[in-house]
Amino acid sequence: MSQEVIAVVILVGVFLGLLICRVSVAVSMGLAAAATYLYLDLPLELIVQYTVGGVSNFTFMAVPFFILSGEMINQGGIGDRLVELADALVGWLHGGSALVNVLASVFFGGISGSAPADIAALGPLEAKLMMSQGFTHEFATSLTCATAVQGMLIPPSHNMVIYAVTAGVSVGAMFTAGLPAGLFLAGVLAVYSYIYARIKGYASNKKFSLKRACKAFASGFGGLMTIVIIFVGVSAGIMTATESAALAVLWSFICAFFLYRDVPLSRYYAIASAAIKTLSTIMILLAIANAFGWILAYLRIPKMIADFVLSLTSNKYAIVILIHLVILFLGCFMSISSILLILTPIVVPILTTLDYSLVQFGVCMILNLGIGLLTPPVGAALYTASGVSGIKIGKLTRCMLPFYGLMVLTLIMLIFIPMPFY
């Protein structure tokens, strides 16, 4: 075998071997890269250089800001106000509590961008509201899981920032494409919930009140402004993603500790600590993935994979579907950030050759990975829902089956339907 082939075997073999031994993805990538660098007699200083370079991208600074902003919103009493606003707007409809679940997750997702955070913050309140209208605990929790995925598509989403930088596309373009995609998924879940409520006879005994709606809007206005700051600022080109994220942190801080004052200022340390805990995992991955990605490119692995995939079929959509099947499989075992950082550099050359929109693929990839968050054995959002609801993983997975179908159907539609914003 040639030196290049042996190097590829070392890189892939060490990486997969360590993953099988349950070593973290970041450590596995780092050790696999180091072993390959040593075999090729490349200076190890390159690892340090590319690791540091992996997190010195200005756009990546949006990631910690979005995470900190989401944590302050999550723990700052915004969730209850968003549920109240959603209830005032749609709670009077047939099966209104389910529609409240969908709409509240749209609002919260536009502030937090995290599915597990959505479930933890709004899940108990939404489930209680739905059960009071007749829905089962299992259905309420399953719907909460499905609606939480919307938040990954609706700006802000730090996963979209990671994909945008890795794929070399505009963050603003990803946000602009992600919003209608998230709303489309919300519409699918809302229609299903409404029909389900009609069949089961879960009518609402509430009536629409303009006064209550205005009062709820005024109460939740501070949280909703976070969405406006981020989406309008980035999409309109007024601010970069990093600048809008920094401004969102400042506004979230004002809302949590001065406007709403549901938590004391002394709690900021705990909120910041929680954000740092989440951020540390992501930033370490971002750093090491850059060194890992460099050796992938050096060995021309993305090109080899692209040539192999393109030799299988010339049908553009067949190849895209095949890629998404791989993503769906990996999503059951690996974290979203890991898959985005490892797989994106590999699939970009394939998609470019196929002339398939990288923005459209990115939106679909985020949704696909969101489905992975709800599937065992490593679905973080699924385990969060199980923890807050007390429903066992196996039972919750079975109850999720109709929602898996709806999300996969939505994914297929987003893959095949070309949209002007792509």
Image: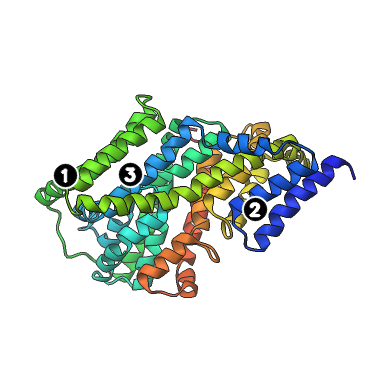
Circle 2 is placed at which residue position?
28
For the N terminus, the quadrant is: top right
In-image side of 131 versus 210 (left or right): right
Instruction: Locate residue 32, reporting x and y percent.
Output: 70, 49
Label 2, secondary structure: give it.
helix
Name, please, the residue furthest toward the top: 238
Circle 1 is placed at which residue position?
259
Cβ atoms under marks 3 and 1 closer than 8 Å: no
Circle 3 is placed at which residue position?
69
Who is closer to the viewer here, 23 or 124? 23
Of the image marks 3 and 1, the number of the one nearer the N terminus: 3
Q: Is residue 354 above or below residue 280?
A: above
Nearest to the eye among marks 2 and 1: give it: 2
User: Looking at the image, which residue is at 51% across and 33% down?
Assistant: 56
User: Looking at the image, which residue is at 48% across and 44% down?
Assistant: 159
Who is closer to the viewer here, 117 or 348? 117
